[in-house]
């Protein structure tokens, strides 16, 4: 199986990414991808993008080098904001794609499963949220797997099988087994997953071989891997909620 969309990529705007939107899009085009989401880190991550960065993503064309570009974010659960996320709902509703995940130095470093689960459940229940990134980061951010998977199914939220979690460079060393457990639970519960690169450098865009091997090993149903191609991504997002910008052909 070959996946033609990558819903998790970073640029220099993330503070620890090393490529531009143009470079990521060109690399995606060179690899034959149909669609990518630009998902830079939200403001809670040290060095993460400012609110204005997300607001102004409207200047980026919706198609670059033949690749459909979704203007998105990888936001963070946050304890001291109205919606429990480090970007307000007004901003999330302007984006084409909203991913959220737990990261270091964002208020969840105590390795507290109950606290993490509560915060992430609140995120999953926000109708503006589309995907939870790397949920299997067990050492750093343990969560209640069953609670998160069933909430994801109830709320039509994608669970990510993150390729970089299987890369020894990631630092998510305990994730290897836990990401697989999440994928198995997602398979059994009827959840939708995305198999993404989490590329922080443009040459890594679309690089999902380790995670895809896991999906294939556990027999994850292909029709529930949302990022098969551009059409499967856009169909899922359109069915989840109204996307005025996508519905208008992505021009906004
Ligand atoms: Zn992340
Ligand atoms: Zn990321």
Image: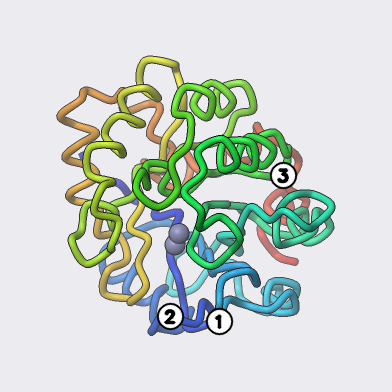
Residue at point 55% right, 23% down? 153
Report helix, strand or loop for mark 2.
loop
Q: Nearer the viewer, mark 2 or mark 3?
A: 2
Q: Residues within 10 Å of mark 3 (few under 14, many from 20)?
A: many
Question: Can you identify the residue that label 3 sits on?
Answer: 128
User: Label 2 near label 1: C-beta < 8 Å?
Assistant: yes
Residue at point 56% right, 52% down? 99
Ligand 1 rendered quadrant:
bottom left
Report helix, strand or loop for mark 1.
loop
Q: Nearer the viewer, mark 3 or mark 1?
A: 1
Q: Is mark 1 within 8 Å of ligand 2?
A: no
Say if 241 sits above or below 252 in the image: above
State the quadrant of the N terminus.
Answer: top left
Report, in whole angstroms, how far the alpha carbon at label 3 lies from the one at label 1: 24 Å
Say if 47 sits above or below 243 in the image: below
Q: Residues within 10 Å of mark 1 (few under 14, many from 20)?
A: some
User: Label 3 near label 2: C-beta < 8 Å?
Assistant: no
Say if 51 sits above or below 87 in the image: below
Nearer-N-terminus badge (1/2):
2
Report, in whole angstroms, how far the alpha carbon at label 2 lies from the one at label 3: 26 Å
Q: Residues within 10 Å of mark 2 (few under 14, many from 20)?
A: some
Nearer-N-terminus badge (3/1):
1
Judged left or right of residue 65, residue 176 is left
Give the x, y percent position of residue 168: 18, 61
Q: Which image quarter: residue 47?
A: bottom right
Question: Can you identify the residue that label 2 sits on?
Answer: 16
- Of 252 and 209, which appears nearest the observer? 209
């Amino acid at each position: 199986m070959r996946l033609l969309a990558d819903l998790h990529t970073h640029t220099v705007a993330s503070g620890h990414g090393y490529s531009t939107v143009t470079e990521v899009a060109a690399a995606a085009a060179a690899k034959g991808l149909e669609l990518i989401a630009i998902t830079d880190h939200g403001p809670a991550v040290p060095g993460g993008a400012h609110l204005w960065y997300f607001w102004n993503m409207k200047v980026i064309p919706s198609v670059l080098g033949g690749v459909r570009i979704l203007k998105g974010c990888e936001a963070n659960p946050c304890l001291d904001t109205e919606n429990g996320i480090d970007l307000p709902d007004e901003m999330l509703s302007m984006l084409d794609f909203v991913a959220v995940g737990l990261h270091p130095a964002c208020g969840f470093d105590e390795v507290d499963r109950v606290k993490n689960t509560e915060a992430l459940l609140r995120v999953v229940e926000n109708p503006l949220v589309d995907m939870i990134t790397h949920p299997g980061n067990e050492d750093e951010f343990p969560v209640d797997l069953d609670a998160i998977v069933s909430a994801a199914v109830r709320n039509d939220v994608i669970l990510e099988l993150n390729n970089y979690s299987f890369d020894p460079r990631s630092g998510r060393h305990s994730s290897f087994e836990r990401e697989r457990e999440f994928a198995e639970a997602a398979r059994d519960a009827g959840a939708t997953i995305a198999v993404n690169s989490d590329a922080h450098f443009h040459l890594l865009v679309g690089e999902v071989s380790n995670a895809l091997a896991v999906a294939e090993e556990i027999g994850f149903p292909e029709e529930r891997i949302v990022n098969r191609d551009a059409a499967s991504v856009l169909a899922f997002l359109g069915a989840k909620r109204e996307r005025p910008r996508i519905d208008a052909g992505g021009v906004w």
